[in-house]
Image (cartoon, rainbow, N blue to C red):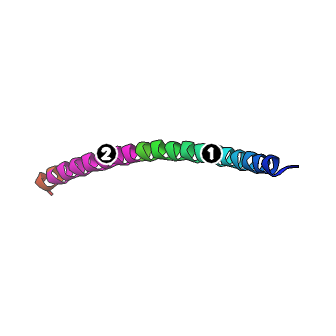
């Protein structure tokens, strides 16, 4: 095997390794995208839950106010 063919073989192996790393990076990027979408959904659910808690707190305050006006 001449120096040139060894060089080409080495470059080919390096290119194959780069391709493998590239595919792994694409998989990681896909997982990051999935996690980002899940995070957005979780934040929306938390905001909705907080809105419901606030609404229930206001209702409770109203009921407490009404109870305070009832005769004993």
Residue in the foreground of this view, choosing between 24 and 63: 24
Left or right relative to 17: residue 64: left
From the image, which quarter does the C terminus lie in? bottom left
Q: Which label was assigned to residue 51?
A: none
Q: Which label was assigned to residue 22?
A: 1
x and y percentages locating residue 30 in the rendered image: 56, 42
x and y percentages locating residue 60 in the rendered image: 24, 51
Q: Is residue 4 magenta?
A: no
How many residues crowd mark 2 within 10 Å: few (<14), some (14–19), many (20+)? Answer: few
Q: Are circles 2 and 1 on residues that touch, CB within 8 Å?
A: no
SS majority, magenta? helix
Sequence-wise, the earlier of marks 2 and 1 is: 1
| Camera-side mark, 2 or 1 | 1
Left or right relative to 32: residue 46: left
Query: Exactly how many numbered labels are in the figure?
Result: 2
Give me the residue at 64% from left, 43% from top.
23
Residue in the foreground of this view, choosing between 4 and 16: 4
How many residues crowd mark 1 within 10 Å: few (<14), some (14–19), many (20+)? Answer: few
Q: Secondary structure at mark 1?
A: helix
x and y percentages locating residue 61 in the rendered image: 19, 52
Q: Is residue 48 magenta?
A: yes
Residue in the foreground of this view, choosing between 20 and 34: 20
Residue interval drawn in magenta: 43-65
Q: Which residue is mark 2?
A: 52
């Amino acid at each position: 095997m001449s120096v040139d063919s060894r060089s080409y073989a080495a470059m080919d192996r390096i290119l194959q390794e780069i391709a493998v790393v590239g595919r792994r990076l694409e998989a990681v990027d896909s997982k990051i995208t999935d996690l980002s979408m899940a995070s957005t959904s979780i934040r929306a659910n938390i905001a909705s839950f907080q809105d419901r808690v606030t609404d229930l707190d206001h209702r409770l305050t109203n009921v407490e106010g009404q109870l305070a006006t009832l005769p004993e």
